[in-house]
Amino acid sequence: MDNFISLWGESAYTSLGFFWMALWAFVLGYLISSLIQVLITKRRMRKAMGGNDLKSVSLGTFFGFISSSCSFAALSTTRALFNKGAAFSASMAFMLASTNLVIELGFVISIFLGWQFVVGEYVGGLLLILFVWLFITLTNPQNLIKNARKEDEEDEEHQHESTLSDLFSKDTWQKVGQKYVMEWQMVWKDVLIGFTVAGVISAFVPSAFFEWLFIGVGTQGEPGFWSLLQQAAVGPIAAFFTFIGSMGNIPLAAVLFGEGVAFAGVMAFIFSDLIVLPVLKINARYYGWKMALYIALMLFICLVAASLAMHYGLLAFDALPDASQWSSPAKQEHFKLNYGFVLNVIFLLLSAVMVVLWRKKQKEHEHHHHHDHGGSSVGDKVMNTLCVVSVLWLAGGMIAYTI
């Protein structure tokens, strides 16, 4: 019993320490993302994404790069672009870029995993988009695309086209504050559950489990091709059952790497935020089950290929990260006075400013609109329950840690 309480305290401390390490990166990334989303409209993006060619896919990738990193927001925007006439390949490029190539994700990965994984995320993300484009071109799913596309009734004719001069407008910054709060509203559950689970796995799950799950873990030397392929294939399967988005998966990825999972397996796990069960169900609602399963299979094949390509690419340059020389975030002292502490204080103050701006915008809307959000779905209820459990677990664990 004493051992359990000790491990409980350790897991809670690790979870909160992970979040404290990444806090400034979250805030900075979402501030940048919110500002860009206010300045660049979907109509401007859609006009440039009409063909299944390199130009449209490249522009879809660029617009995704400067957009939100939340998987569920990316799905919604992708559907709107697709139904408004963007090519399927360009829409998929946007979806992948908006979850894998965004700025804030790079910040968090650099904190938890190091520069090689940042390179893997961005270069591998571009490879993933290229492989998806080739997959769509070769399979040519015209009937699926035709059946999946629906007329989007959203009216954007009177949407304001922002310019850089709008940066000096109070209304612009109120909109940025609104977007910023919306970003956190969309991801806080993923982040809370993801960081809690990362702490639990770090403290409770023995290394023998990872050696059983991922072939080649615990052995000396570079894993063979078949071991790497198995790890890259198991990574997405493990991610499928986490229910966690890209930002929440990074501390879990750090735990996997610390346990000896190869670069390819860790990258495949990180890339898998768009094939988790809630995303599959949302795609089925948007496009039908046939298209949803096509997208899931396409992403699985392409992300495994991209992860292996990045692994062997870094190996060729003798640049693969060495887990034995890597300092696990779980073993670091999290709450100390350093540059991270100062950055967290600064960005928490900026967050407070964004919340104040959001609240002013909300008061304006309250005079004109009354919102009825309706009931929660089963998925929402499950996530809410897991959030309550996570909060109770962290609170109890910190009490156990301080005793």
Image (cartoon, grey):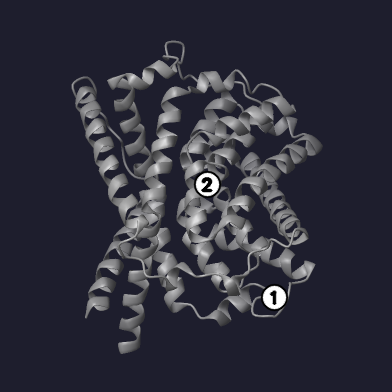
Of the pair 308 and 384, the residue shown nearer to us:
308
Of the pair 149 and 106, the residue shown nearer to us:
106
Q: Residue 90 in the image: x percent, y percent?
A: 65, 30
Q: Disc 1 residue type?
A: Gly
Instruction: Indicate the quadrant containing the C terminus: top left, top right, bottom left or bottom right.
Output: bottom left
Can residue 132 be seen here? The reply is yes
Residue drawn at x 74%, y 27% is 53
Instruction: Indicate the quadrant containing the N terminus: top left, top right, bottom left or bottom right.
Output: bottom left
Vertical relation: 98 (above or below) 265: above
Residue drawn at x 52%, y 19% is 43
Q: Which residue is mark 2?
A: 279
Q: Secondary structure at mark 1?
A: loop
Q: Residue 174 in the image: x percent, y percent?
A: 29, 26
Left or right: where does residue 290 sit relative to residue 245?
right
What distance separates the C-alpha of mark 2 from that of mark 1? Answer: 30 Å
Vertical relation: 107 (above or below) 337: above
Residue 216's tag is: 1
Label tally: 2
> As drawn, which residue projects farthest toward the top?
158
Can residue 52 be seen here? The reply is no
| Dot in front, 2 or 1 | 1
Q: Residue 175 in the image: x percent, y percent?
A: 33, 26
Mark 2 / mark 1, whichever is N-terminal: 1
Q: Disc 2 residue type?
A: Val
